[in-house]
Amino acid sequence: MTSPVDLVKSFYAALARGDVPAVVGVLHPDLHWTEAEGFPYHSGTWRSPQEVVDKLLVPLMRDWDGFSAAAHDVVAAEGRVFSIGAYAGTSKATGKTMRAPFVHVWEVRDGKLSRFDMHTDTWLVRQALAA
């Protein structure tokens, strides 16, 4: 059985490869996914892997060149997994580059990622998208 830390690491690895089926494959069907308020793609809490694809992955591919979410540290504590890293990319609309540190808080249920909460400096991301 995959550990919660390894499961989270596999999510970032699939994301880095652009492997959407693998990303979806590690997400629980009864998902609770919340982007940080103020993040350009925040629209409440998403409840399915397909919402993550439609409301996050598709817009990221549309709006950014080389967008990445690289977790440098992934640790488990208090029944959760915490990943610390940074977003990076170049806005297709403005040509501006962006690097924004993040902390993600994950929960695992039934061997799948069941909860995601994002904490980041949304201003840095918005500045790169602003004309």
Image (cartoon, grey):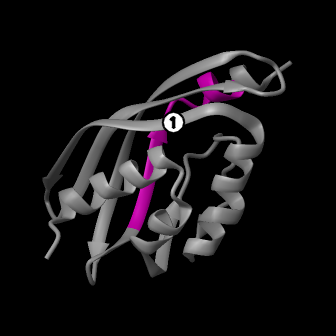
**Horizontal placement of 107 versus 65: left or right?**
left
Query: For the magenta stretch, what is the residue range?
Result: 115-126
Q: Where does the N terminus fall, quadrant-wise?
A: bottom left
* Residue 4 in the image, given as x and y percentages of width and height: 20, 64
Determine crowd level at label 1: few under 14, some 14-19, many 20+ residues with C-alpha closer than 10 A: some
Q: Where does the C terminus fall, quadrant-wise?
A: top right
Look at mark 1 in the image and give the residue it sits on: 68
| Residue 65 within the magenta-colored segment of the rendering | no
| Image vertical order of residue 15 relative to residue 116, above or below | above
Quadrant for residue 54, please give it: bottom right
- The three-letter amino acid code for the residue at tag 1 is Ser
Picture residue at 60% right of the left edge, 22% below the top? 124
* Residue 22 in the image, given as x and y percentages of width and height: 45, 66
**Horizontal placement of 84 versus 73: left or right?**
right
Picture residue at 47% right of the left edge, 48% below the top? 17
Picture residue at 81% right of the left edge, 19% below the top? 94
* Residue 43 in the image, given as x and y percentages of width and height: 70, 58
| Image vertical order of residue 60 relative to residue 88, above or below | below
User: Which of 38 and 91 lies nearest the eye of the viewer?
Assistant: 91
**Horizontal placement of 90 versus 30: left or right?**
right
Quadrant for residue 60, please give it: top right
* Residue 77 in the image, given as x and y percentages of width and height: 13, 54
> How many labels were placed on the picture?
1
User: Which of 96 and 125 lies nearest the eye of the viewer?
Assistant: 96
Q: Under tag 1, what secondary structure?
A: strand
